[in-house]
Image (cartoon, rainbow, N blue to C red):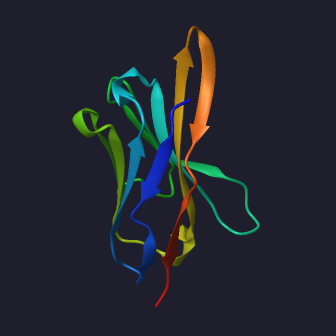
Amino acid sequence: QVQLVESGGGLVQPGGSLRLSCAASERIFSINVMGWYRQAPGKQRELVASINEGGATNYADSVKGRFTISRDNAKNTVYLQMNSLKPEDTAVYYCNAYYYSDYVPFNSWGQGTQVTVSS
């Protein structure tokens, strides 16, 4: 299975920025979709942003215009640039990879990285 390792979380003030990174153990151009999800305490995990193998992106309405997902195939890494952060963005952020191996679908998750937006 593809192994994913997130980094870049931390504490930031409202209005600040953070960039999350997700390093994959395999070549990401072979992965159908990579995405960032988040889960706040007491809430369900939700999709934040995704990017497919063709580079098409998708964002949750709550982060449109503030967050940008991108990928660097040479580094096998996906990024989430988060600007204008709000307290409601506080959550554990998880990287996800959806791909096929021998025609069987797989879903891999990273261990998560905490993002806290607070003054």
Q: Residue at x 41, y 72 (%)?
A: 85
Report the front residue among 117 and 61. 117
Is 99 placed above or below 80 here? above
What is the quadrant of the N terminus in the image? top right
Question: Looking at the picture, how far across and down is residue 60, in whole percent?
Answer: 51, 49
- Outermost residue to the top: 103
Is 27 placed above or below 114 here? above
Q: Residue at x 33, y 66 (%)?
A: 83
Question: Looking at the picture, how far across and down is residue 103, in whole percent?
Answer: 58, 8
Question: Looking at the picture, how far across and down is residue 99, in whole percent?
Answer: 52, 23
How many numbered callouts? 0
Is 105 placed above or below 17 here? above
Relative to 39, 112 lies left or right: left
- Outermost residue to the bottom: 119
- Outermost residue to the right: 42
Q: Residue at x 55, y 15 (%)?
A: 101
Report the front residue among 112 and 61. 112
The quarter of the picture where residue 93 lies is bottom right
Relative to 95, 71 lies left or right: left
Is 109 placed above or below 33 here? below
Q: Residue at x 49, y 44 (%)?
A: 4
Question: Looking at the picture, how far across and down is residue 11, in whole percent?
Answer: 45, 80
